[in-house]
């Protein structure tokens, strides 16, 4: 029985991928009729890399939402605000770390190393700060609302608006945008978007997007191992199935779900800091990326605690959006909802779930 269910789940993943790439092939034929082959292949390859990078950014952002919703069973409408705030915290951590490192004699003249270490500090700083914010929210508010869906939605929506207002007060109106060059003393980033990999005949790929793809796959592998191969992962999954039984075995489920919520918030902060070179830190990303998170968790079936569903859904949404943006400009905002509609009709439980 278990083997049959796994086989069916994989078949659904194949079906959705077939729909996604069938659409891409349609774009291929459409473009082939209007452009020569070399230009089309060049555009296709660049768009594929951009799509994979965007998919990994979506996964980095949604993985935190997956943990909070899929494992802790909390509908967190503030997650987009966590992601946005992670960008600002990453920016501030970067500038602070840079100012400190420029006063260290051994590395002060090596701007590449200063920028790299500042970037690492930005990722760590954003993750820690958002983890602490998540801890405060969970301990003082969310902990009293487990199992109360409407109360969770109202509370986290309120936190989203609080975060937006405080961010606007501190960093200015939505038109203000920050990246790791803004405010920097050395005015350079260790892996600027202007640096590209040229493999010939016009194939130019941004190094930072390649880095983002690698970073996303590594984090996905780490999360998958933790959730599906470690004792704490087994305990969390058991807590999803039957929290009372896990509590009866002497395991503090309240502490377990607190840890999950804090980790989810920290991952949102990490994603926001990683995203700054691509989308900049600004107020407008909160709402847009929250919508992506909801679409991805529904397509992936995150409510059932399956990380692979979220990963595949991020790939499908990211690639579809990017290809539409390049080949059918103006249609990219619709394609993700078409994919969502297809899933809700044919597989309401998502790629890795059962019908609710």
Image: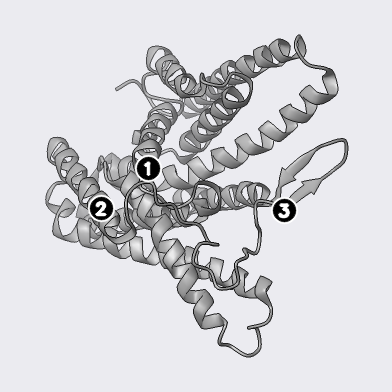
**Residue 92: x %, y % from top left:** 42, 67
Picture residue at 30% right of the left edge, 65% below the top = 132
- In this rendering, does residue 40 appear at all? yes
In the shown orientation, is residue 212 left or right of residue 124? right
Q: Secondary structure at mark 3?
A: loop
Image height of 107 relative to 268, above or below: below
- Mark 1 to mark 3: distance in Å? 26 Å
Q: What is the crowding at mark 3: few (fewer than 14 residues within 10 Å), some, or many (at least 20)?
A: few
Counting residues from the start of the chain, the first of labels 3 and 2 encountered is 2
* Residue position marked by numbered label 1 in the rendering: 284
Q: Where's residue 97, x and y in %? A: 49, 75
Classify mark 1: residues with Cα within 10 Å, few (<14), some (14-19) or many (20+).
Answer: some
x, y (%) of residue 66? 38, 42
User: Where does label 2 land, which residue?
Assistant: 163
Q: Which residue is mark 3?
A: 195
Q: Which circle's residue, 1 or 3, is located before the other in the chain?
A: 3
First in sequence: mark 1 vs mark 2 = 2
1 or 2: mark nearer the eye: 1
Residue placed furthest toward the right: 200
Horizontal and vertical percent position of residue 329: 56, 21
Instruction: Tell how many labels.
Output: 3
**Which is more toward the observer, 14 or 25?**
25
Question: Mark 3 to mark 2: distance in Å?
Answer: 34 Å
Q: Residue at x 34, y 54 (%)?
A: 265
Q: Is residue 279 above or below residue 355?
A: below
Q: What secondary structure is marked by label 1?
A: loop
The residue drawn where x is 65% and y is 83% is: 107
User: Looking at the rendering, which quadrant does residue 172 occupy?
Assistant: bottom left
Query: What separation in Å lies between label 1 and label 2 (alpha carbons)?
Result: 12 Å
């Amino acid at each position: 029985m278990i083997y049959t269910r796994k086989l069916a789940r994989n078949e659904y993943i194949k079906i959705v991928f077939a729909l996604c790439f069938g659409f891409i092939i349609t774009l291929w034929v459409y473009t082939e009729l209007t452009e020569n082959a070399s230009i089309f292949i060049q555009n296709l390859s660049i768009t594929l890399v951009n799509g994979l990078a965007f998919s990994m950014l979506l996964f980095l952002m949604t993985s935190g939402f997956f943990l909070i919703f899929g494992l802790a069973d909390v509908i967190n409408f503030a997650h987009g605000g966590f992601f946005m705030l992670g960008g600002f915290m990453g920016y501030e951590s970067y500038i602070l770390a840079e100012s400190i490192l420029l006063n260290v004699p051994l590395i002060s003249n090596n701007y590449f190393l200063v920028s790299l270490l500042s970037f690492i500090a930005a990722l760590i700083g954003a993750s820690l700060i958002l983890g602490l914010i998540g801890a405060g929210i969970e301990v003082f508010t969310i902990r009293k609302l487990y199992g109360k869906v409407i109360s969770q939605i109202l509370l986290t929506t309120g936190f989203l608006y609080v975060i937006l207002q405080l961010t606007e007060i501190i960093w200015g109106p939505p038109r203000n945008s920050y990246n790791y060059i803004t405010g920097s003393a050395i005015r350079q980033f260790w892996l600027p978007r202007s640096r590209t990999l040229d493999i010939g005949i016009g194939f130019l790929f941004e190094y930072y997007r390649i880095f983002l793809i690698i970073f996303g796959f590594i984090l996905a592998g780490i999360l998958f191992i933790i959730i599906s191969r470690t004792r704490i992962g087994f305990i969390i999954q058991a807590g999803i199935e039957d929290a009372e039984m896990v509590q009866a075995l002497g395991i503090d489920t309240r502490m377990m779900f607190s840890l999950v919520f804090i980790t989810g918030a920290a991952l949102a902060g990490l994603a926001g800091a990683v995203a700054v070179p691509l989308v900049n830190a600004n107020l407008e990303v909160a709402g847009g990326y929250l919508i992506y998170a909801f679409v991805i968790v529904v397509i992936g079936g995150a409510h059932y605690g399956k990380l692979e569903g979220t990963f595949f859904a991020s790939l499908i949404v990211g690639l579809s959006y990017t290809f539409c943006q390049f080949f059918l400009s103006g249609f990219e905002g619709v394609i993700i909802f078409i994919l969502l509609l297809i899933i809700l009709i044919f597989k309401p439980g998502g790629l890795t779930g059962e019908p609710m």
